[in-house]
Image (spheres, rainbow, N blue to C red):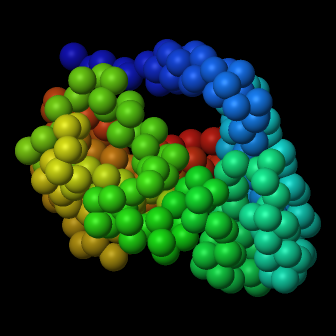
Amino acid sequence: MTKIIDGRKIAKEISESLKTKVEDFINKYKITPKLAVVIAGGDPASLFYVKMISKSCERTSIDFEKHSLPSEATEEELLKLIDNLNKNKKVSGIIVQVPLPEHINQERIQEAVNPSKDVDCFNPINMGRLALGKPEFLPCTPYAVYELMKRENIVVEGKHTVIVGRSNIVGRPMALILLQKKQHSNATLTVCHSRTNDLSYFTHQADILIAAVGKPEIIKRDMIKEGAVIIDVGTNEVEGKLVGD
């Protein structure tokens, strides 16, 4: 029998708990945490995601600040903005929404974010700490998947977990999180990607399947074994609608 994980219910529980913690922090230190989001261009999936971030901040008493740049903005303009946000003591965290326009070096921009404010852990220092199992904090999207499985009491230890996608946004850090020697991790992992031959061969073996490749409906019903846990991280626009992987 198929069971749908109620992500909205879990998100509500987390928001309520986080709101209490944030308000306690504000009362104690007289400082309100602030998240700054930088977006360049008008990618529909990115705009949707930023809107969701804004609502989450509002629900949890975190200040939200959006910096929108046109798609023709230069790399230097973006770097200058990030430098200002790095220096701004009122900004606690920074997200640079990807994808960026093609003429901008995405890695250079991500590496410019102060590691202590790097919410997505794109900075090599944060990714390196995660690879060594010594993260200061976890990147938000993979952490959300981890928290979802933990709260649903999904046993990860020893289970064959197949991750479809190897990006620095989800796939790669997700694998590193699930490899950690800690409770709710210790997975046996396979990471697939765009160059994987016979993808269905691997997905059929998955006790837990995490789809994060960014290709609409790449995972079909007949590619999944009965009883498998499926987490769809994909956010894709098809004919004006958002669909998963």
Percent x, y for residue 2?
27, 20
Residue 239 visible somewhere in the drawing: no
Quadrant in which residue 198 is drawn: bottom left
Nearer to me, 152 or 31: 31
Residue drawn 72% across the image and 69% down it: 100
Question: Which quadrant of the figure contains the N terminus?
Answer: top left
Q: Is residue 187 left or right of residue 65?
A: left
Q: Is residue 164 left or right of residue 158?
A: right
Residue drawn 28% across the image and 72% down it: 196
Quadrant in which residue 208 is drawn: top left
Residue drawn 65% across the image and 81% down it: 108
Residue drawn 60% across the image and 17% down it: 20
Percent x, y for residue 15?
58, 22
Percent x, y for residue 184?
22, 37
Rendered view: 16 above or below 198: above
**Which residue extends farthest left?**
158
Percent x, y for residue 23?
68, 21
| Total marks placed | 0
Residue 9 visible somewhere in the drawing: yes
Nearer to me, 158 or 196: 158
Nearer to me, 43 or 147: 147
